[in-house]
Amino acid sequence: MSKLKLIIKREFVAKVRNKSFIVMTFLSPLLMVGMTTLIVFLSKKNTEKPKTIAYLSEYKAINALEDTKTIHFVAANSKILEDAKAETQKNKFYGLLYIPNNDNINDVAKNIQFFSKDSPGTTLIQNIENLLGKRLKHLKYKEVGIDEAKLKASSIKTIVNIASFEGKKTSKLVSNIKIGIGSAAGYLIMMFIIIYGNMVMRSVIEEKTSRIIEIIISSVKPFDLMLGKILGTSFAGLLQFIIWIIIGFGLMSIAGVFLDAPANMPQQAAQLQEIQQNTLGFDLITIIQELPLANIIISFIVFFLGGFLLYSSIYAAIGAAVDNETDTQQFVLPIIMPLMLAVYVGFAAVMSDPHGPIAVAFSMFPLTSPIVMMMRIPFGVPLWQVLTSMALLLLTFLGVVWFAAKIYRIGILMYGKKPTYKELYTWIRKY
């Protein structure tokens, strides 16, 4: 046990003292927040400046168009289409909107054209379609004799109130929050496994190629060495993740202050009011408090560590079996596939039916349970399912460690030849 502690300490200290580890610990959140801030800033700048669009309307019922937040309409002086195109290009307007004349409103709606030098974005075209669609719809109401005031008065907004059999109320917003929490937890687990699992594998390969492993293995059991590497790297990774979260939240808070301009306050207030109306009186803090937070946090820690230890054992075995990172490609793909499958099942099955047979089955399967179960837990999972999934994950981890230790024990002393799957099976069976 004392040797295992020394190995864990050695791996942890070696990782946290590494210059690249220190640089990326502080640089990664800066880059992520910087990129996010830049994207938001550029998106705001792109939408803040309205595009000037000329319009030529031969349809008398539409003789003027009102400006929107993103479009400034200018009536073309020319009444001939070709001349209006030339005028638009001469004035360097973004484009020309042409509304043809026709006695049938339906034909008018089908033959509207937009001319521009560059291909317009889908958002711009959708905004124009919505604007003209409303105008033509009102004209159609008048044509067929529909009283628009009565039509609006007769419209009914149907809301389905969600509640459990015990009378506990909920809403669509609550479900969206649960989806967000579950997706974030599952995605974090997947990224942690991939990033730090590869780190374990590279560490084994480096020591193997430098022949340091031959000296270490003379005084330490291969199993202790493998387990020490896994645990030491996981502790270093957890420390890095915690620092990322702290720095990331701090930087995002600072960036949010600079990005929220006073001009956007009325729009934000309107959005907040709309959200409050859609929640049917639910308070956001109350909603979060009613979530199974204790269950989510405890389960996240267990599945987070369980999933990482399970996959890191496989990564360590791969690192011991090969001599360089190039040779790992044929072995790494089968590891990543269950993780990708878990994410796909989580988004495709859990979000549509968190208690369905597909979601339940994959939340029990050990290779996918760390991600899928974490996506299910915010929706309320029976305790026996959570405990069963944890037990299966633990048993699988012990089994994989046993198999990985066999490969590790032979592989760390093998040089010059890339093993095949058949040879790995022989190592497991004979040694």
Image (tube, grey):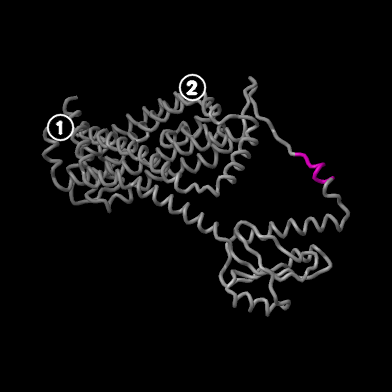
- Nearer the observer, 50 or 330: 50
Q: Is residue 421 left or right of residue 217?
A: right
Q: Is residue 241 left or right of residue 365?
A: left
Identify the residue shown where x is 70% and y is 35%: 159
- Nearer the observer, 389 or 281: 281
The relative height of residue 375 versus residue 147 in the rendered view (above or below) is above
Residue 338 appears in the picture as rendered: no
Q: Is residue 10 left or right of residue 403?
A: left
Q: Which residues are magenta?
A: 150-156
C-alpha distance separating marks 1 and 2: 40 Å
Identify the residue shown where x is 50% and y is 39%: 346
Say few, some or many: other residues with alpha carbon within 10 Å of mark 1 (under 14 / 14 to 19 / 20 or more).
some
Q: Does 174 lie within the magenta span?
A: no
Q: Say which quadrant the N terminus sits in.
A: top left
Q: Is residue 150 left or right of residue 114?
A: right
Q: From the top left corner, tell me how far across and down residue 50 is, in percent.
A: 58, 61
Mark 1: which amino acid?
Answer: Val
As drawn, which residue projects farthest toward the front? 262
- Nearer the observer, 100 or 344: 100
Q: From the top left corner, tell me how far across and down residue 34 is, in percent.
A: 39, 50
Mark 2: which amino acid?
Answer: Trp
As drawn, which residue projects farthest toward the top? 166
- Label 1 sits on a secondary structure element that is loop
- Label 2 sits on a secondary structure element that is helix
> Which badge, 1 or 2, is on the more N-terminal residue?
1
Q: Which mark is residue 384?
A: 2
Q: Which residue is mark 1?
A: 220
Q: Does 155 lie within the magenta span?
A: yes
Q: From the top left corner, tell me how far across and down residue 97 is, in percent.
A: 67, 68
